[in-house]
């Protein structure tokens, strides 16, 4: 049976969305193509009609994962007045909900440590997402009257704190990592929080 180009594109997008969620939940290496395709409601054999390799899917899933989480984060930040934007970014990013639902969160904290062992193409897709996150932090810091050059520090603090919070089996310690990250971020913009 032949499908339309629209159907093929919709199927490809479904595979990418499923991969972005599953990779954030379980990690790239833990998710096989067969399980991923089954989760997307498709057969394993159809995978290669859409992607030349799992690595190509990882690159596409990085773009999708960053895009999804950044759209939500941007909406939260832009609803706050200048002077509160970086704090809003930190409150959302370093929330217990974000920690507890990695499949819907930022892909940087979920699979960042794995990406260093992937291809240049995948790392480039991941880097584009990181740049967008830094750009968002720069805009928030500038709106708050702070130094936008602190944006990489803000992103590193948020991603690092979230990784540690997710890694800790002690919920009290996990909460302390989140709060410490939020405090460090508030200190970067003089008018924030």
Image (tube, rainbow, N blue to C red):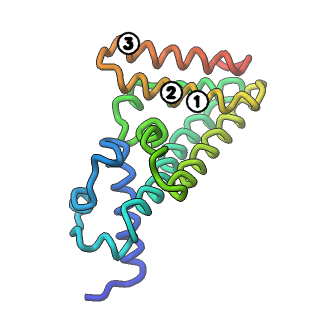
What percent of the width, then of the height, locates residue 32?
Answer: 26, 55
Above or below 20: residue 94: above
Q: Which residue is drawn at 76% across and 24% down?
A: 146
Task: Say if mark 3 contacts mark 1, CB within 8 Å.
Answer: no
Helix, strand or loop at mark 3: helix
Q: Residue under label 3, please give it.
A: 173
Quadrant location of the C terminus? Answer: top right
Question: Quick one: label 3, few (<14), some, or many (20+) residues within 10 Å?
Answer: some
Extreme-bottom residue of the structure? 2
Above or below 110: residue 185: above
Task: Say if mark 1 contacts mark 2, CB within 8 Å.
Answer: yes
Quarter of the image for residue 13 reads bottom left
Of the pair 129 and 30, the residue shown nearer to us = 30
Q: In this view, does 123 lie to the left or right of 19?
A: right
Q: Residue under label 2, please give it.
A: 160
Quadrant location of the N terminus? Answer: bottom left
Helix, strand or loop at mark 1: helix
Helix, strand or loop at mark 2: helix
Of the pair 14 and 26, the residue shown nearer to us = 26
Quarter of the image for residue 53 reads bottom left
Of the pair 77 and 190, the residue shown nearer to us = 190
Q: Which residue is drawn at 39% across and 51% down?
A: 20
What percent of the width, then of the height, locates residue 109?
Answer: 46, 35
């Amino acid at each position: 049976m032949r499908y339309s180009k629209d159907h093929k594109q919709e199927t490809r997008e479904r595979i990418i969305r499923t991969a972005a969620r599953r990779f954030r939940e379980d990690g790239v290496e833990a998710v096989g193509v067969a399980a991923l395709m089954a989760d997307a409601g498709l057969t394993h054999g159809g995978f290669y009609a859409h992607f030349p390799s799992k690595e190509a899917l990882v690159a596409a899933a990085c773009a999708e994962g960053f895009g999804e989480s950044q759209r939500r984060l941007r909406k939260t930040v832009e609803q706050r007045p200048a002077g509160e934007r970086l704090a809003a970014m930190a409150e959302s990013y370093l929330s217990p909900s974000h920690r507890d639902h990695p499949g819907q969160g930022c892909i940087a904290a979920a699979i960042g440590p794995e990406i260093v062992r992937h291809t240049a193409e995948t790392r480039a897709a991941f880097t584009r997402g990181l740049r967008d996150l830094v750009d968002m932090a720069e805009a928030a810091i500038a709106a708050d009257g702070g130094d936008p050059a602190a944006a990489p520090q803000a992103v590193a603090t948020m991603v690092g704190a979230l990784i540690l919070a997710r890694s800790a089996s002690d919920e009290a310690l996990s909460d302390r990592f989140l709060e410490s990250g939020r405090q460090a971020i508030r200190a970067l913009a003089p008018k924030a929080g």
